[in-house]
Amino acid sequence: MTQSMQNNYIKLTISILLVTLSIHAKAVTEDQFRVHGLSSFKNNQAKMLESWLTQGVNATRATLGIYPTPLELHIYPKKSNQPVPWAYTQRNGKGSIHFHVDTRFGLTKFVNDWTIYHELAHMALPYLGPKYRWLSEGFASYMQYQIMAKSGVLKGTLEENYQHKIAPHLRWFNSNLTAASIAKRLMDNKQYPAAYWGGAYFFVEADKLLTLKHHTTLTHLITYYQDCCRKNDHKLTDIIRSLDNILNDTIFSDLLNQYESQPARELYPKVFNQ
Ligand SMILES: [Zn+2]
């Protein structure tokens, strides 16, 4: 090989490497999420929103794993007294998340707001239907703080935050009715904080059992679940079966069964104590 052939060879190798790197970088970003609605915002606001969404997706990935389907994120301008006054998930087809945002708030206020972590957490599980909306909201509420704690934006400890949110609603579960029927009724009566945080207690219990029996955590299990099973699951019974199969145990079917057949006061403490 002559000197110039060698130089050309090196140049060619470098350019192939660069092409490979740029294709790879592009693929990773586009695989994770797509943003719709940025054109309704001024340039610098659109950039700030993109940074916020990227941070939210990365923080969620770090806690709950890489979702098998790319996230479709829609944003709309809305004047309010908070950065994200309203957000919801839509579950038809691949599913999408819709955020109404007030860009008069800065990036820090957006990143510290729990809404994005809650909505992104919903997508770790398939749609559970109206009967189990309390469980879906319980999951997203439990996970929003797990994601925030891991990414360093949660104020106070996880225990303090769960205590603060769950303790006021324990009185609803001091009853002979089943926990599932109470949580569903709270949801149907639009008593959302009680339904959400009463439902989140299911995952406090599940996490405790995972630590005790399997020396693992719910976030680790959900991360593994994204990889092995999420794509093939379509309803709650699928999820319960997948999680129990991963563990080779009956933790989740037993817990759901208790929620649906046992008096709630046998499952919920009178005083929250994690
Ligand atoms: Zn929710």
Image: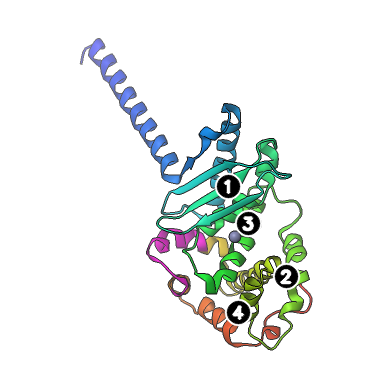
Q: Is residue 272 in view? A: yes
Q: Which residue matches tag 3?
A: 144
What amino acid is at disc 3? Gln
Viewed as shown, does residue 56 lie left or right of 80?
Answer: left
Residue drawn at x 59%, y 84% is: 258
Residue drawn at x 30%, y 24% is: 13
Q: Secondary structure at mark 4?
A: helix
Identify the mark nearer the N-term, 4 or 1: 1
Q: How is the image coloured?
A: rainbow
Q: CA distance from mark 1 to mark 3?
A: 16 Å
Q: Nearer the viewer, mark 4 or mark 1?
A: 1
Place of residue 177 in the rendered image (x, y in percent of width and height, measured from the top left): 66, 86
Q: Quadrant of residue 112?
A: top right
Furthest-left residue in this view: 1
Mark 3, Cα crowd under 10 Å, few <14 / some 14-19 / many 20+, is many
Q: Please, is residue 242 above or below residue 109 in the view?
A: below
Place of residue 45 in the rendered image (x, y in percent of width and height, measured from the top left): 61, 31
- The magenta span reads 222-237
Count of picture labels: 4
Which quarter of the frame holds ligand 1?
bottom right
Q: CA distance from mark 2 to mark 1?
A: 33 Å
| Residue 180 tag number | 4
Front-most of 13 and 34? Answer: 34
What amino acid is at disc 4? Ala
